[in-house]
Image: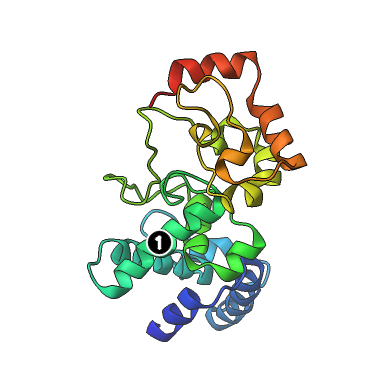
């Protein structure tokens, strides 16, 4: 079982792949205990203490439990591996263009992130199970030099943010305050941040700068 847990923890298998393995194991189990092949497979995995199930572990459940438990352990560890885990969580945060820990407000991971980022898989499994790993001390959050600020990931419409995300993260633009002047009243000229005027910048301003947005900036942004 320990080898299985290790394999499931490190190899980025998809849910479909694990479901296929589960189906094969369940077919063998049904044959061995002498029940009809038409017997509900989920019934075999239900808790025997609270239902008529057999409590037979699901490969998917084992993977989910193992990875979330390992993430909890490493995030709270003061070992080199623990520090690497926290650094990788911050890397995931920045890749997503967020300002808070992706484990505290998890979302569905893209196929690319699922394949290439271990913490991205943890985030996805937390999202699947409606769970979170709280960042109580905000050690995994990106801070702003303003008293209050608005994340661009929240200020922009979701589809626009995803379209601009690479342009934003490659230039370390995470907050509305990153594109606003010191008073928070108007956007900066892109050249002040060494950015060449381009269509993506115009799109960014179009979706963040309007009368309502400017009023909100004035109310919420401060040095």
Outermost residue to the right: 199
Q: Measured from the top left, where is residue 146 in percent x and y?
A: 38, 31
Up-down relation of residue 124 to residue 144 (above or below): below
- Residue at the (44%, 23%) spot, across then down: 221
Q: Which residue is mark 1?
A: 48
Up-down relation of residue 183 to residue 53 (above or below): above
Figure quadrant of residue 136: top left
Q: Secondary structure at mark 1?
A: loop
If the image is split into quadrants, where does the N terminus sit? Answer: bottom left
Q: Does residue 163 show up?
A: yes
Q: How is the image coloured?
A: rainbow
Q: Measured from the top left, where is residue 17 in percent x and y?
A: 65, 73
Judge left or right: residue 122 versus residue 76.
right
Up-down relation of residue 178 to residue 141 (above or below): above
Q: Measured from the top left, where is residue 73 in percent x and y?
A: 29, 65
If the image is split into quadrants, where does the C terminus sit? Answer: top left
Up-down relation of residue 185 to residue 204 (above or below): above
Residue 164 vs residue 44, the one in the foreground: 164
Residue 100 vs residue 43, the one in the foreground: 100
- Residue at the (43%, 44%) spot, across then down: 100
Q: Measured from the top left, where is residue 8 in percent x and y?
A: 49, 76
């Amino acid at each position: 079982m320990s080898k299985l847990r290790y394999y499931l923890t490190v190899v980025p298998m998809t849910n479909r792949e694990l479901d296929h393995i589960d189906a094969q194991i369940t077919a063998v189990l049904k044959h061995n205990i002498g029940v009809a092949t038409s017997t509900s497979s989920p019934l075999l995995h239900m808790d025997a203490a609270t239902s008529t199930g057999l409590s037979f572990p699901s490969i998917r459940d084992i993977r989910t439990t193992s990875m979330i438990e390992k993430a909890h352990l490493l995030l709270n560890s003061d070992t080199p591996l623990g520090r690497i885990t926290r650094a990788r969580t911050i890397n995931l945060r920045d890749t997503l263009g967020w300002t808070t820990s992706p484990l505290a407000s998890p979302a569905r991971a893209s196929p690319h992130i699922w394949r290439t980022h271990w913490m991205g898989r943890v985030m996805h499994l937390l999202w699947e199970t409606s769970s979170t790993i709280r960042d109580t001390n905000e050690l995994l959050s990106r801070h702003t030099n303003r008293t209050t600020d608005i994340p661009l990931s929240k200020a922009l419409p979701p589809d626009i943010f995803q379209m601009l995300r690479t342009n934003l993260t490659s230039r370390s633009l995470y907050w509305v305050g990153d594109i606003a002047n010191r008073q928070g009243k108007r956007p900066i000229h892109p050249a002040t941040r060494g950015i060449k005027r381009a269509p993506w910048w115009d799109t960014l301003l179009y979706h963040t700068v309007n009368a309502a947005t400017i009023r909100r900036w004035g109310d919420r942004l401060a040095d």
